[in-house]
Amino acid sequence: MKNILSLCLVLLLAACKKDNKTFSLKTIKLSDYRKTYLLPQKLYLEVFDGNSSTAIAHTDPYPSELTLPATFIVHPNVPMTLYNKKYKIQLWGDVSGYISGCQINMDEYKIIFPIDMEVESDSLTVSIAGSWE
């Protein structure tokens, strides 16, 4: 019983310290998106810092005719301060251009372990995965 209480206390203290840590985004899993009149194309995801129009990271392309979910590796592996800034993830196609997007809102989460968090909007559902540095 003592060991369990000690472990819970350590995890609680570790969770409180994440506010000042940086997060390294490693993968994005595309679970679903609204497919409206889209031709077969290569899909890719881009990550944006706040309201910036310049992507800070992107993924390799994935054929839209293949099944979902699909996991994408993020390039480059950029440090992100998730608790202090807002980030956006956008889905793009090489034929249609911008398809959909969603925002990462960390105000709704307290993460203890390496992150695997679902982020969604009305037309896009993705999961982000990575680790704390």
Image (tube, rainbow, N blue to C red):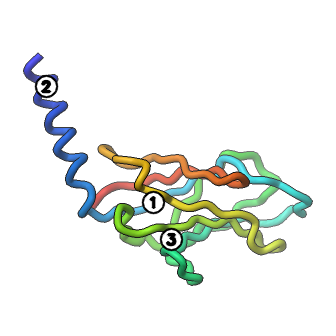
Residue 74 image offset from top left, x and y in percent: 52, 65
* Tag 3 residue: 75
Please name the amino acid that badge 3 sits on. Answer: His
Classify mark 3: helix, strand or loop.
strand
Q: Is residue 68 left or right of residue 96?
A: left
**Label 2 crowding class (10 Å Cα cut-off): few <14, some 14-19, many 20+?**
few
> Mark 2 or 3, which is nearer the eye?
2
Q: Amino acid at mark 1?
A: Lys
Local packing at callout 3 (Cα closer than 10 Å; few below 14, some 14-19, many 20+) is some
Instruction: Count how many numbered circles sit on residues in the image.
Output: 3
Q: Which residue is mark 1?
A: 26
Q: Residue at x 47, y 73 (%)?
A: 76
Please say if 39 is above or below 120: below
The alpha-carbon separation of the residues under discs 2 and 3 comes to 40 Å
Q: What residue lies at 46% left-to-right and 67% top-to-bottom?
A: 86
Ranked by sequence position, the earlier of labels 1 and 3 is 1
Q: Secondary structure at mark 1?
A: strand
Q: Is residue 13 left or right of residue 67?
A: left
Q: Quadrant of the C terminus?
A: bottom left
Quarter of the image where the N terminus is located: top left
Q: Earlier in the sequence, mark 2 or mark 3?
A: 2
Closer to the camera, 127 or 81?
A: 81
Q: Nearer the viewer, mark 2 or mark 1?
A: 2
Q: Earlier in the sequence, mark 2 or mark 1?
A: 2
Q: Disc 2 marks which amino acid?
A: Leu
The image quarter containing residue 54 is: bottom right
Q: According to the image, label 2 marks what residue?
A: 5
